[in-house]
Image (cartoon, rainbow, N blue to C red):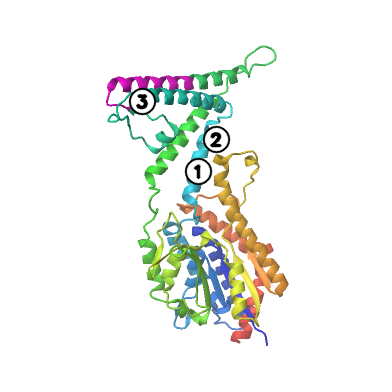
Amino acid sequence: MEDTKYIISIDGGGIKGIIPAIILAEIEKRVTEELKKEDPNADFRCADFFDIFAGTSTGSILALALTVPENNRPKYSGPFMVDFFQIHGKEVFPNYSPFRFVDKLLKNITNIFQGAKLSNMANNVVNVVKKESLKVEKKVRNLTDNESEETNIKVEKKSFVESVFGFITPTSPQEEKSIQYNEINNKTQIKVEETVSKSKSVDVKKSNTEDGTTSKPDDNNDDDDKSFKDHLKELEDYFKSYDPFVPKYDPSRFENLLTEYLDELKLKDTVNGVDVFITSFNLSSCERTFFTNLNSEHGDILMKDVIRASAAAPTYFPAKNISNKYFIDGGVFMNNPTTRIYLEAKKKYPNSKFVVISLGTGRYISPLEKYSNAGVAQWVSPLITLLMDSEQLNHHDFMEMLAEFDGSKYYRIQPTLEEELNLADASDDDVKKLIVVGNKVINDSNNKLDEIVNLLVDKCKKKYY
């Protein structure tokens, strides 16, 4: 007789992991309520009705925590994990994105240009800068060509923003040469300012009405300048508060929490003998890694180490050292592990049927029409998000087709976020918004939660009664 295996797969997503936690808590509640009609003492948890748990990053926290044993029963429940994310999530689990630093940096740089609204001035300014820069380069070369090899022009160290967006003012051991160079530099800067001023005056002239009167000058120019300076300051503040050459967070608090809740439990110690499957990436061998007890290879690895490895988001946490190999967040190659665990489960249980439930952590959809004629400066940031989002959609499509071919049941719950939350440093308000999203999900009939609960109730009746 064929049995049916129930798979739960949970995406990565940092603090957004509170959304699947809310869904799992609701499933536990509904299943238990139904079974209490026959047994008043019924108390069912996820590890009582799911046979296989898979997760990436924050999904690994949920997947493994829900399989922790205590007196031969699951120690942690869905509601407990919701509280866990509310209390600890925003403090130690950043919103997963392996490219978050680059993404935010590029957004800041792009915003500088967008904030300044250079559409009317850019061509004029850039052309002048190019021409004057060539003149400066030529004159500096003439000055230095006459120098002896022992004489070098020293360059004053500037901040990152000044180096990129400003003129680097050199100083020479010979004061006369330095003065000449500074004069050249000042002339260039004056010409640029004159060009910008002319460009603004042209805009005002173009605002003349047909009856010969002049319309009120556009006050947006002041706003543009302010926006430009604000974005520059934002970028400089970002570099002051965050050293891009080291991970943003010390992992010690995260690791202490994992030790507190998981102790020294190993992958082979899961309650009810459930299977687990966690993604990570091995930096030492540049290979994908799947920590699992589906075989004996990883059975003796500590659960807390596996979570730490799977949630080691680049730029946020340092890689996790396990047996002298370094591991980072599995989301760099597979944020949604559903398809992979399904195929692994079919290989181990070739005679079984499957019910697969895949939980996302929310997706924000932003139209991209504004990039239809954009260049590299504007495209790099949204392109990273687009590629990651496409990976998620591809996994969903593949899983749908596989389930249809195999006669398996497949449910994907992925809520749409109404706004893009800045969750790298989530506030209490951000967490509250995510809780609202989670509550909407469990009350949305389109997610077929009632159908999922009915299947799980039937399984528990057959298994335990």
In depth, the one of 224 and 351 nearer the eye is 351
What kind of element bears circle 2?
Answer: helix
For the residue marked with disc 1, what is the amino acid? Answer: Leu
For the residue marked with disc 2, what is the amino acid? Answer: Gln
User: Which of the two discs, 2 and 3, sits closer to the camera?
Assistant: 3
Quadrant housing residue 217: top right
In depth, the one of 303 and 459 nearer the eye is 303
Query: Mark 2 highlights which residue?
Result: 114
Which residues are the magenta region? 171-193
In the image, is 153 to the left or to the right of 448? left
Q: CA distance from mark 2 to mark 3?
A: 40 Å
> Which one is earlier in the sequence, the residue at label 2 or at label 3?
2
Q: Assign the C terminus to one quadrant of the image.
A: bottom right
Q: Position of residue 310 (x, y in %)?
A: 47, 65
Q: Assign the N terminus to one quadrant of the image.
A: bottom right
Vertical position of residue 247 compared to residue 84: above or below: above
Q: Residues within 10 Å of mark 3 (few under 14, many from 20)?
A: few
User: Which of the two discs, 3 and 1, sits closer to the camera?
Assistant: 3
Q: Position of residue 16 (x, y in %)?
A: 52, 58
For the residue marked with disc 3, what is the amino acid? Answer: Asp
Query: Mark 1 highlights which residue?
Result: 106
The main secondary structure of the magenta stretch is helix
